[in-house]
Amino acid sequence: WSVTNEVMAITDHLSGDDRLVSYAASLTADGGKLVLAHVEDQQVFARYIDTIGKIPTIDTQVAKEVILEQLLKQPADYILSCQQALEERPEHNIHVEAVITLGHLLEDYKRLIEQHEIDLLVLNTKDDDQLAMHGLAYPLAIELREIPLLLL
């Protein structure tokens, strides 16, 4: 088992995922960094904005700005609450960093992992209503063979 100074927890719906964050925090070395990352899927967002653009009674530019702001606000608020909760626990001497962006899931996660020199990646493998691996977990497990993964 390697040292886990730099741990990243990722999901496309980080908000409210206490189990994922708890595992990632508990595996971050004392004095280490926990990166809580949320990438909103740019292709899905573009598809919805394109659909909204076909409705003449809705101002597409305003809708795009307001929807994106809200989509990114939810994970930002959740990560802030995680940062505050972890700071209140003296046994967790870790720095919690937020990364919230709109982009291409696999490409951006790979870039963030390299950029932050991540030692351990923590992610969910499935949703409660699925029997098989979550859509993002499989390609990440295949693509990221050079770093340890904790698949929950």
Image: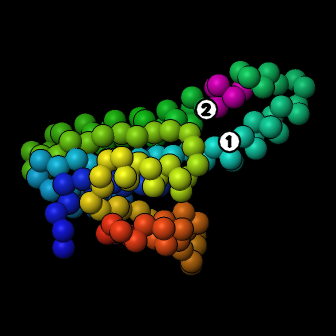
Total numbered labels? 2
What residue range appears in magenta? 63-67
Q: Amino acid at mark 2?
A: Leu
Q: Do the CB atoms of the residues marked 1 and 2 lie less than 8 Å apart?
A: yes
Quadrant position of residue 135:
bottom right
Residue at x 43%, y 66% (from the top left corner): 144
Tag 2: Cα neighbours inside 10 Å, few (<14), some, or many (≥20)?
some
Q: Amino acid at mark 1?
A: Phe
The answer to whether any part of residue 18 appears in the image is no
Q: Please name the residue that numbered disc 1 is placed on.
A: 45
Residue at x 45%, y 39% (from the top left corner): 100
Considering the image in quadrants, where does the C terminus appear? bottom left
On the image, the x and y values in percent for residue 115 come to 36, 46
Q: Secondary structure at mark 1?
A: helix
Q: Secondary structure at mark 2?
A: helix
User: 17 or 25: which is nearer to us?
Assistant: 25
User: 40 or 74: which is nearer to us?
Assistant: 40
The answer to whether any part of residue 44 appears in the image is yes
**N-terminal-most mark, 1 or 2:** 1
Tag 1: Cα neighbours inside 10 Å, few (<14), some, or many (≥20)?
some
Q: Is residue 42 left or right of residue 151?
A: right
Q: Is residue 107 left or right of residue 150?
A: right
On the image, the x and y values in percent for residue 72 come to 52, 35
Residue at x 82%, y 39% (from the top left corner): 51
Residue 68 tag number: 2
User: 113 or 21: which is nearer to us?
Assistant: 113
Considering the image in quadrants, where does the N terminus appear? bottom left
On the image, the x and y values in percent for residue 117 come to 29, 52
